Image: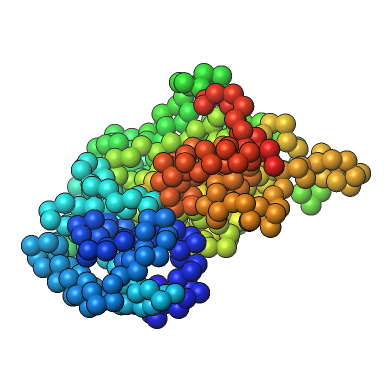
Amino acid sequence: MGNMFMDAKQFKKILEEGEGISIEFKICQSGPEDDTYETVCSFSNRVGGDIFLGVSNSGIVKGIPKDSVKQYINDVISVASNPDNFTPIIYLAPKAFEYNGKMIIHIHIPLSSEVYRFKGVVYDRTNDADVKVISTDALTAMCIRKQKVHTERMVYPSVTDDDLRFDLFPKIRQMAVNHRPKHPWKDMSDKEIIQSAGLYSEDHKTGKFGYNLAAIMLLGKDHVIKRICPTYCTDAIFRKVNVDRFDDRQVIETNLIESYDKLMDFAEKHLLDKFHLEDGKSISLSGIISKEMLVNTLMHREFISPYIAKFVIEKDRMYVENANRAASAGAITLDNFDPKPKNPIIAAFFRNIGYADSLGSGIRKLYKYVKLYSGKDPLLIEGDVFKIIVPLDDNYSFDVESFKKLTGQKGNEDDRIDETSLLDDLTASELKVYKLIIGGAAMTTEDMGASIGVTSRSVKSTVSKLVAKGYIKRIGGDRGGRWVKLK
């Protein structure tokens, strides 16, 4: 948003959207207080953002006294540039503008590669709240997010040929040829493939050469991977009957190539493979969806993070989640996604052996095939933990629904939402939550909050309002129950 001129139409839209990951309102009738600077700090440590002084938390414009505007702006600049307050200091350029006869001060906070502290405390932004960063894991995630160098390029000179699985190369070579018959890896030696794939490189800080983290994750022996990334694994869980624990579980701690095979076997074991024809050929919808989810969580995760990656299959949804070096936060859709590989070396290797296609194609496939598989859209949430949620409905059949529409029978029309009929009765945030509950996957309040940029507490409050207005009701308990639409 920057420090551009703020027109009335633009500001009105911000007020309607409300506070979120990068928007904050402060009343500041008596001047900016510490909570304003805590938000400055949290925005600097997250994705940047915009603070508006003179507005209540609920988006009601109160205004700043006109004779105090200049002093407030000077106070903000002075506090932010004082090393006793901010470490490192931050340079801000607040701007004042008028809206409906009231003065507002706009403070834009840019995205930064530094970790900022306000009065010795690190603050981060979680949905629409500023939170103190206390745990080492949270601070590690922040530092990873701000690193300019991909961690997969970290060089480990002490790792030798004996630490790698050279026995995998016949399989790798064959997979590359199966993917592309004239693939150059067909006639390369093992070491030439390693060089071609960028798995052996120079540490520009020390000048030493060695295998990098990408090589270790793709080809490392299990004990070597565990030595370098102690918490690395993918926890595969199946729970439909025993929802408090699990019905089946497999902790996979091997290299990425074999991890993919093991995880796909787990998915095939526990997912219903519905019949579907595409271009006259039978295809496996569950196989395509599982592949896209698992490839994403294997090749785009942040391996040095202590966060445990998961692949979970439940009765009404399945999901993957992994540590992530987030460039932004919130829901990813077909309209807003900007494909950027988190681990370019590993992503390129996966493409060479046919595990992955062109950059960005995975998201498009997920939206296409999840709709065919369950009748609903997937949910992708960007953040320090990246999450893909896919709704499951064993009773849904695209072919049956298509036949009903052709024959005039009643299909899923009752699940459609006429937004225009709801706009007068629901606020923008209520409509967003309503659409997620009715049309999306089975999600927790935390997932919903991450999707629309508010806290889980705000989601719970909104759900209560939707119940009070008679739009939804709960059938069953918290664990096995579900929400149903009343209007």
Q: Position of residue 452 (x, y in %)?
A: 48, 52
Q: Residue at x 42, y 60 (%)?
A: 59
Residue at 70%, 54% in the rendered image:
421
Left or right: 42 as drawn, with respect to 314: left
* Vertical comparison of 14 with 421: above or below: below
* Image quadrant containing the C terminus: top right
Q: Is residue 211 visible?
A: no
Front in this rendered view, residue 140 or 436? 436
Residue 324 image offset from top left, x and y in percent: 37, 50
Q: Give above or below for 209 relative to 366.
A: below
Question: Which residue extends farthest right?
Answer: 407
Residue at 31% from the left image edge and 60% from the top image edge: 26
* Residue projecting furthest to the left: 84
Q: Quadrant of residue 308?
A: top left
Query: Where residue 440 sits: x, y (%)?
Result: 60, 44
Estimate the x, y position of residue 67 in percent, counting from the top left. 24, 77
Q: Quadrant of residue 38?
A: bottom left
The reply to whether residue 226 is in sight is yes
Q: Is residue 168 left or right of residue 239?
A: left
Frontmost residue, 480 versus 388: 480
Number of numbered discs: 0
Q: What's the coloring here? A: rainbow
